[in-house]
Amino acid sequence: MTPLQTVVMAPPVGVAARDPRPGLSALDRAALERWLVDHGQPPFRARQVHDALWGGTATRPSDVTTLPRSLAAALDAGFRWSTMAEDTIVLAEGGQTEKALHRLSDGATIESVLMHYPARQGRRARHTLCISSQAGCAVGCPFCATGELGFTRDLETAEILDQIRSAVARLGQHEGAERLTNIVFMGMGEPLLNLDRVLESVSVLNDPARLGLGARHITVSTSGVVPGIRRLTALGPQFTLAISLHAARDALRDVLVPLNRRWPVAEVVAAAREHAKKTGRRISYEVTMIGGVNDTDADADAIATLLRGDLAHVNLIPMNPVAHTPWTASPMPVIEAFAARLAGVGIPVTIRRNRGQEIGAACGQLAAEHAGQPAAPAVARRRQRLEAESARALRGQRSDEPVPAGVEG
């Protein structure tokens, strides 16, 4: 396989813009059984439909040979077998990273990334899928390509699940019929601003009759939506909660994570700390390392002070190249020194390697490329604004910019 390869999957037959039919993958067993009985079919066919949705190669109801033709036609009339109107798959690193650009029936685009980790040193092979929960994002973190796109809409439950079904189908084509082992809600969007649909999706993923993935193999990320964290704490889920931290100093985090202007970092970490206390699950803190911005000894010490004694783990991630920003990734020796400073005070830390940089595998990059380049004057203005804001932040001045539109609370 070549290092870089693109595969375009044809759109399913019958998909039209603004398709009003619900996605079939979001329908639970009881609801599907009721629908079947209402259409003169025995309830056991629900299992046949779910088996075909989650484990087969069918791309439409008529492909499922165990279903009567009349039922296949009724399913096609009432539901979308897939909510993905078109998938563009880009492969890199010898096929170890697969970036998918999914076009939805209304023309919105979202992304998912499937990463393969071969078995080694007694550890079995892993296949991790990063998925989107919204089309675009309202939070607007300036180092994230999705932030350049703005916010389009929340995803339906089926639109979340069908990203996973697309990956499961591709894994089924691998030698040995590999299984998906981990799912992370770290793609486009802020999951806790679409929490109902995210929780519905997790319930489906846990269902043994469908994907059957244990909650501890699922990670849900947030940039710091405190009401959502508190709601999760009340529910007590066993999936991993990840916080997009990026900075522990409010002035700097105001710039890097604009949501911080609504929920400051100490409030976010306090809510996460309570979540860890109730669930017994370690919180994962993500820090995108930006050269000369958030990678100093002072930044490491601020994180150490904030998290010392907590049930927490820090992931340091070199910044992916993102168009229209003045920033680049921290050099690896700087990241290693930052990690050593955290580890030296007892905070568990890992340096994560970026995957698929040549295909724009960071969230939003492929969609941004397809959206086209903004006008040069707009790019220049954006770079100047970020440079000025980050300079003020490094002097300790809080942002006077408003909370991003679309962020509730």
Image (cartoon, rainbow, N blue to C red):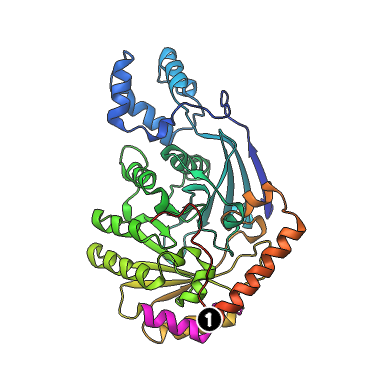
| Displayed quadrant of residue 223 | bottom left
Which residue is at the front of the view, 403 or 56? 403
Q: How many numbered marks are there?
A: 1
User: Is 23 placed above or below 213 here?
Assistant: above
| Displayed quadrant of residue 211 | top left
Residue 250 picture location, percent across and down:
46, 75
Is residue 293 visible in this depiction of the protein?
no
User: Is 232 placed above or below 67 here?
Assistant: below
Assess whether residue 204 is covered by the magenta stretch. Answer: no
Which residue is at the front of the view, 75 or 266? 266
Q: Is residue 179 left or right of residue 144?
A: left
**Residue ID at (30%, 69%):** 273
Assess whether residue 295 is covered by the magenta stretch. Answer: yes
Residue 84 picture location, percent across and down:
54, 36
- How packed mark 1 is, by other alpha carbons closer than 10 Å (few <14, some 14-19, many 20 or more), is some
Outermost residue, right side: 376
Residue 323 picture location, percent across and down:
68, 61
Predominant SS along the magenta part: helix
**Residue ID at (30%, 41%):** 208
Q: Which residues are magenta?
A: 291-306
Residue linked to disc 1? 336
Residue 138 picture location, percent across and down:
51, 54
Q: Is residue 116 left or right of residue 268?
A: right
Where the C terminus falls, by quadrant? Answer: bottom left
User: Is 60 placed above or below 283 here?
Assistant: above
Secondary structure type for disc 1: helix
The amino acid pointed to by label 1 is: Glu
| Displayed quadrant of residue 182 | bottom left
